[in-house]
Image (cartoon, rainbow, N blue to C red):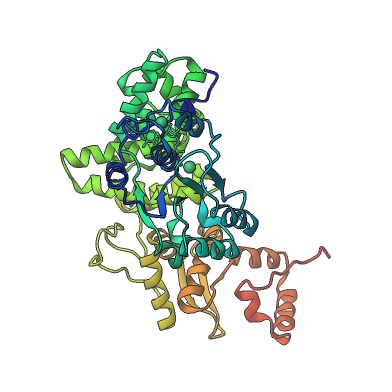
């Protein structure tokens, strides 16, 4: 395989393009009826066929064949476009050329007639990345489009495109591809390459590709490089897919409510060289399967736990610990083990808005605080749950200070990592930040003092007006020996 697979098997006409039926149909009709727009936007996630379709469209417009089957794929024009050497088809990657110069060049060039074919086609990839000036220049061109010029603007971030441009283009949405379509496409490649494969192997790859065809093909290529075939065992090994047995064990450990078996499985995932992310994906998949067959409260509780854990894991540095803490906290293991549930009674699953609200202990009746907590609950259930189960939220001695006081050192460590996120939401909703009350840090420093020294120290700190800041953890005390 000298050529990269995804290039070698890039669809050369709409029959070969998988899915995207609407795009194919509408564009096909437009060409048939000669009702072309001057500018198209191809929007969709990566590897769904935007560039491929842009080239196919360019070929259809410029194909020199007399027959009705277009693009023919064999005329000089089709061949030139396939090899990116057509004089009238220009591809530009706005991710690397963002500036006005490139667009000016286009603006100057569009007024000349096509050289080789009937249409000049400009394909601008990731065009949302153009600078403002470049956008404006492009807009001018779109406002007075010369005949026989077609713009195809591809983007993975449609929301970043100014309205002025949107309103001048016809927009096509490229959908993520479904698993069956991906499997079918991979199978075609596997056959053509005379590879050994099986259904299960292709399925695993198509799942891991999350709707992106390029990713699917690249993953398959990785598996081939790794083991020479695309059979289930090879795919499992190279994508790090866990044996189903482990998933099964986890589901059991979860329903039994036994923390130590959950922790043991977490350990096993890591020591086996697997990742918690892949594990979660598999587990969520398995639980979805069960829910379809026989829905139960237990299943819903597990699904909710895994889903929240998955979200949290994306940004976590220590994936293993985060996984463990999240599963144990969110899975409500404390309650099942009869330990004190502190401030929160009832199930921690927010499946709907009407769920009974927990008693959040707010020492000083503060509307600001309760309004913040309500916001937090809505914007990040995980953060909210972590916060209210691990800490007390209150005002400081000075009324403008907002304090989060963890209930243990361990909670404090967990919250430290989340303070930035909490405060981002706090700033957005109540325009204030919280201070994490780090008792250990303060007490540790003072522990070594005898009583007299401590009283003396207190009076100095109070005299300086720093007592509040110290208690709130705003300032840290470090004492030198002696
Ligand atoms: N809908 C599709 N049908 C078949 N193959 C596809 C499809 N979308 C993408 N591919 C494969 O992925 C590769 C990259 O596709 P491309 O059109 O460049 O994606 P995009 O421009 O949307 O990121 C193609 O060469 C092809 O192998
Ligand atoms: Mg592309
Ligand atoms: Zn042709």
Quadrant that contains the C terminus: bottom right
Query: Is 343 rendered above or below residue 432?
Result: above
Residue at position x 51%, y 57% from top?
A: 128
Query: Is 170 rendered above or below residue 459?
Result: above
Report which quarter residue 373 is drawn in. bottom left
Between residues 194 and 373, which one lies in front from this camera angle?
A: 194
Numbered circles on residues, count: 0
Left-right relation of 122 to 336 = right
Between residues 297 and 287, which one lies in front from this camera angle?
A: 287
Residue at position x 54%, y 34% from top?
A: 84
Name the spot of residue 168 as percent of width and height, x first.
41, 62
Between residues 163 and 31, which one lies in front from this camera angle?
A: 31
Which residue in the rendered view is the most extreme toward the right? 482
Which residue in the rendered view is the most extreme toward the left? 294
Name the spot of residue 303 as percent of width and height, x first.
29, 46
Res. 265 visible in picture: no
Residue at position x 42%, y 23% from top?
A: 235
Left-right relation of 354 to 378 = left
Name the spot of residue 350 as percent of width and height, x first.
29, 60
Q: Quadrant of ligand 3?
A: top left
Name the spot of residue 187 as percent of width and height, x first.
34, 22
Res. 13 visible in picture: yes
């Amino acid at each position: 395989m000298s050529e990269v697979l995804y290039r070698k098997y890039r669809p050369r006409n709409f029959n070969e393009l998988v899915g995207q039926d609407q795009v194919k149909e509408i564009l096909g009709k437009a060409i048939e009826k000669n009702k072309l727009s001057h500018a198209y936007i191809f929007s969709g996630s990566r590897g769904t066929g935007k560039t491929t379709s842009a080239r196919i469209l360019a070929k259809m417009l410029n194909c020199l064949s007399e027959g009705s089957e277009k693009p023919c794929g064999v005329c000089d024009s089709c061949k030139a476009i396939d090899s990116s050497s057509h004089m009238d088809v220009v591809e530009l990657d706005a991710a690397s050329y963002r500036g006005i110069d490139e667009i000016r060049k286009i603006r100057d060039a569009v007024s000349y007639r096509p050289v080789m074919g009937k249409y000049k086609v400009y394909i601008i990839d990731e065009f949302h990345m153009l600078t403002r000036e470049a956008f404006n220049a492009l807009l001018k061109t779109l406002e007075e489009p010369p005949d026989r010029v077609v713009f195809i603007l591809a983007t993975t971030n449609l929301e970043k495109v100014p309205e002025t441009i949107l309103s001048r283009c016809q927009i096509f949405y490229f959908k993520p591809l479904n698993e069956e379509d991906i499997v079918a496409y991979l199978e075609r490649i596997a056959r053509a390459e005379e590879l050994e494969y099986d259904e299960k192997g292709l399925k695993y790859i198509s799942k891991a590709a999350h709707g992106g065809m390029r990713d699917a093909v690249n993953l398959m290529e990785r598996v081939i490089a790794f083991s020479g075939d695309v059979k289930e065992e090879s795919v499992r090994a190279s994508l790090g897919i866990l044996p189903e047995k482990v998933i099964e064990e986890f589901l059991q450990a979860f329903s039994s409510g036994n923390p130590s078996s959950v922790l043991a499985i977490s350990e096993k995932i890591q020591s086996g060289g697997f990742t918690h992310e892949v594990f979660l994906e598999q587990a969520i998949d398995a639980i979805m399967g069960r829910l379809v067959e026989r829905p139960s409260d237990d299943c819903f509780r597990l699904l909710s736990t895994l889903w929240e854990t998955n979200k949290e894991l994306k940004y976590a540095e220590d994936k293993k610990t985060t996984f463990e803490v999240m599963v144990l906290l969110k899975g409500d293991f404390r309650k099942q083990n009869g330990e004190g549930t502190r401030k929160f009674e009832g199930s921690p699953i927010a499946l709907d808005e009407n769920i009974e609200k927990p008693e959040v202990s707010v020492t000083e009746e503060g509307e600001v605080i309760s309004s913040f907590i309500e916001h937090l609950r809505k914007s990040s259930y995980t953060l909210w749950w972590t916060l209210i189960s691990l800490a007390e939220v209150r005002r400081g001695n000075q009324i403008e200070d907002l304090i989060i006081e963890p209930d243990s050192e361990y909670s404090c460590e967990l919250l430290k990592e989340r303070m930035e996120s909490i405060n981002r939401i706090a700033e957005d909703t109540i325009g204030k930040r919280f201070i994490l009350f780090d008792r250990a840090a303060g007490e540790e420093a003072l522990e070594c003092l005898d009583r007299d020294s401590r009283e003396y120290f207190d009076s100095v700190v109070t005299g300086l007006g720093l007592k509040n800041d110290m208690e709130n953890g705003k300032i840290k005390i470090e004492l030198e020996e002696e």
